[in-house]
Image: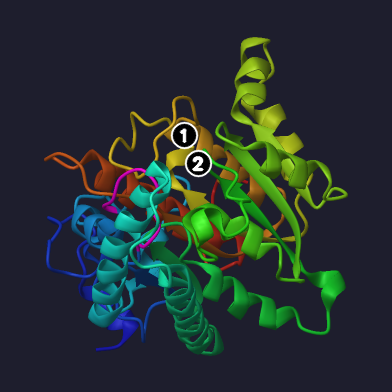
Amino acid sequence: MTKADKIAAFDPNGVGVADAGLFGLPFTPEDAELVVIPVPWEVTVSYRAGTALGPETVLEASAQVDLFEPNIPDAWQLGIALDTFDDDLAARAADLRLEAEQYIDGLSTGAAPATPDLPARATAAGQELREWLRARATQHLDAGKLVAVLGGDHSTPLGLLDALAARYEGAEADGFGILQFDAHADLRAAYEGFEYSHASIMYNALRIKQVHKLVQVGIRDICEAEARLAQESNGRVTVFYDAYLQEERLNGTSWKKLCKKIVAHLPQHVYISFDIDGLDPKLCPGTGTPVPGGLEFEQACYLIKYVVKSGRRIIGFDLNEVAPGTDPDWNGSVGARLLYKLCNWMAVSQGKLKTTEF
């Protein structure tokens, strides 16, 4: 059945089918315009575990998402599909996570680690994950797909960033920027001894020469070394602290004006890295490291939309740190809806969907 046949046969007003594709849609990675790669990886979560179940949690909740977008009428017809799960990847991450938990507990008590070689083994595994994801993402990009990553902890998307960066080889002036939604700066070098720690993702991303700019939004948990790195980056890193954004709002500055200020720091091509703990933790109570404060759901969506309205092009994105919570699972519900927004607005930015809004 062709994609056109699937669209003609599909009822977007029908009941969501739990065992269907992402959002209950009938598409496969072969006929979809946008492919989401699930990365159920979680090795170095600092506070509490569960984010490796994020892709499964979002997939299950996505069947309950109504597909109509008032400002993007044909959104569901784009074709969004979830790539296949790699069970070996999840199993390896689970084994390493158990060892890392004991290792990190030992660090907190000052005890000598029982497995001193663990950081080296975890780094090797993280490098393998990075290379696997780069190859997988490159395959989809070469096929003309839009590509996103659904984690997992926040260490997961480096391979996608590598694959996108390869599109800018020899054209450094045309590099791209990262818009990061997060409670944490994630600028630590090899946090707790782990090079591919979830707390080191942006430190590692900045080592990619094609990443010309990092704009962080909602930050409210940061160490001195991270703040100093940003301050000494010669403008490569701009941090919009949550305290600053909330104070400006209390002083009467509109969110629209703040979004304009944020987006002004971004280059033409933008990658969005969304750690769900960038939202107010009431929206994602199951996430690995919740922090008071943060953005409301519609604030985040407005900023994403403003990036597109500015004429910038979203070249890829990741959504991470969604962990299952209580039943019914509020975390999965919010994560699935955020994923749908990110997919649709990336497609609008690339001319694959049309919006009536601007």
According to the picture, the residue beneath numbered tag 2 turns out to be: 301
Asked if the residue under mark 2 is in contact with the one under mark 1, i.e. CB atoms within 8 Å, the reply is yes
Q: What is the number of callouts on the image? A: 2
Give me the residue at 31% from left, 78% from top.
Answer: 89
Amino acid type at image mark 1: Glu
Q: How crowded is mark 1: few (under 14 residues within 10 Å), some or many (20 or more)?
A: few
Q: How crowded is mark 2: few (under 14 residues within 10 Å), some or many (20 or more)?
A: some
Q: Residue 5 carries which label?
A: none
**At which x and y percent is residue 6?**
26, 78
The range drawn in magenta is 42-50
**At which x and y percent is residue 4?**
33, 81
User: Does the magenta-highlighted stretch encompass residue 236?
Assistant: no
Q: In this view, does 258 lie to the left or right of 60?
A: right
**At which x and y percent is residue 307?**
65, 48
According to the picture, the residue beneath numbered tag 1 turns out to be: 298
Name the one closer to the observer, 4 or 20. 20
Name the one closer to the observer, 107 or 331. 107
Q: Distance between the residues labelled 1 and 2?
A: 5 Å
Residue 247 seen anywhere in this rendered image of the structure: yes
- Helix, strand or loop: magenta stretch: loop
